[in-house]
Amino acid sequence: MSVSRRAFLGALLGTVAVSGCSQAVDRLTQPKLPDNLLVPSGADRHPTAHLLNRATYGPRPGQVADVERVGKERWLRRQLDYDSINDKEVDWKLRRFDSLQMRSEDLMSFGRNQTFIVNELVQATILRAVYSKRELFEVMVGFWSDHFSINHFKDTDTVIFLKTIDDRDVIRRHALSKFGDLLKASAHSPAMLHYLDNTVNEKSHPNENYAREIMELHTLGVDGGYTETDIQEVARCLTGWSISGRGRFTFREEWHDDGKKVVLGQEIPAGGGQKDGDKVLDILINHPSTARFVSTKLVRRFVADDPPPNMIDACVQTWQATGGDIKQILFTLFTHPDFEQAPPKLKRPYELLLSILRTTNAHYDGDDGLIDWLVRLGHRPFGWVTPDGFPDVADIWANNLFGYWQLERAALHNELSGVDLDIWDIAKHVGVDDKADKMIDFFGRMFYNRTLNPTEEAAIKGFYSDSGRFSQDLSKDTNRRRMLDTLMILIAGPAFQYR
């Protein structure tokens, strides 16, 4: 996606004006930025920064050099062996969120007073994504939360509480295990069964919702080779898969259709009871369409909106050779010869927020105010209404770049609730707070993980100087305000907004 110079600056200056910047809009005349500054390109990116931009929520200061020292492959293997990574620091930060460890019946006992339950899960999710040393694991938690998407707010009695259990016992427990284990855990998840209406699936009135979605969204894909008859047969197999009043999985034998079924050409004999559903899961896990559908989504997430077929094929081959081992599939993906040539991918709002916090080493105290920003930007974790999860392509999010710029401006002006991000403190700490050129060069390297290329340098420094009306001396308030606006151009550029 490219954005014209006029559209980019027009929207950006509107952000400054609407947000109440003290500098008058007429002082921010449109700079003559080259159009190619606004066209994403991976030509200049550092290969290690590229890996970290895809396998984490954005590199932290100094992390590119650290990974360079240990080697990308060694770092990747370490991330995949996430259990060996000491994460006590983030565990300490999570200690105040009591609901994360509660039993289902305790969570459901809160009744209508559920706001802090749902907010605690989102706050903890943000904290983990910002601070956890198990960085790839956290990215995969986000991926699977979209793949097995559950809307927090379907109802105020069940799902709104049980999603906490699903996050803990399904997604996080199996995010880097085998896909089959993850699918089976999800199929026994009270939150998932209630969200997709299988709790009312009984033999006299079969409900096909979960049966349809487990094939269309979780395994085979819409073109994966199943029919309407298969949906009906899977629904029959899953009759009686329900939850108890305490919010736990239970099988209601009296609700189950115990007759013979045929699913995707495979006969499931009569009299199987709960095992009918287990057999369906095995059929779906081992179906070739599942490997291709999920591999395609992985390549789309980590490589390109239009996933390269050869990379999908490589992931499918590893899937088939390892029985769907997620760690091995990811290793194949990230070490594929074509990975470094991946085109830029637009950060979704949640990813943009996290990358800002991580890149600047900002302090986030777990305040729930960031949730409001994510709601405003349409990317509140666990808030996607339909079961297909948040979209992972630029076309959906590029229409809200004005919202992106508002978030970026708030961050640069240290106006994010619960976040301490002092640009001038950073600049003073590294000794670049006195001269404009030094400050632009430093933050260019911080945000882009490389030096500015000549086009970028000319455009950004030209915007700051504005025909000589602003001096290099950053001791003046006028120049400091101008510098923040200049850093806004820097952070709103494609080299940062794209992974």
Image (spheres, grey):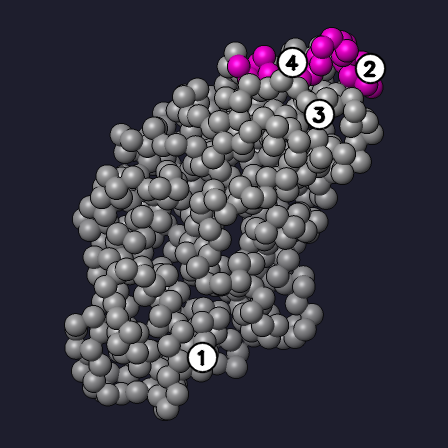
What residue is disc 1 on? Answer: 199
Which comes before the other along the chain, label 4 or label 1? Answer: 1
Please report the residue visible at 76 percent of the width from the left and 12 percent of the height from the top: 470
Amino acid under disc 2: Lys
In the rendered view, tell whether residue 19 sits above or below residue 225. Answer: above
Residue where numbered disc 3 is placed:
485
Q: Earlier in the sequence, mark 2 or mark 4?
A: 4
- Identify residue for label 4: 462
Q: Nearer the viewer, mark 4 or mark 1?
A: 4
How many C-alpha atoms fall within 10 Å of the one at disc 1: few (<14), some, or many (≥20)?
many
The label shown at residue 111 is none
Label 2 CA crowd tier, 10 Å (few <14, some 14–19, many 20+): few
Circle 2 SS class: loop
Left or right relative to 293: residue 173 = right
Look at label 1 and name its amino acid: Thr
Point 26% across, 60% down: residue: 224
Q: Earlier in the sequence, mark 1 or mark 2?
A: 1
Q: Earlier in the sequence, mark 1 or mark 3?
A: 1
Image quarter of residue 276:
bottom left
Closest to the observer, 66 or 425: 425
Residue type at the position of mark 3: Asp
Q: Is residue 302 above or below residue 262?
A: above
Query: Which residues, given as a range, are shown in magenta?
Result: 455-479
Q: Secondary structure at mark 4?
A: helix
The CA distance from mark 1 to mark 3 is 54 Å
Label 2 or label 3, whichever comes before in sequence order: 2
Say if 33 sits above or below 81 in the image.
Answer: above
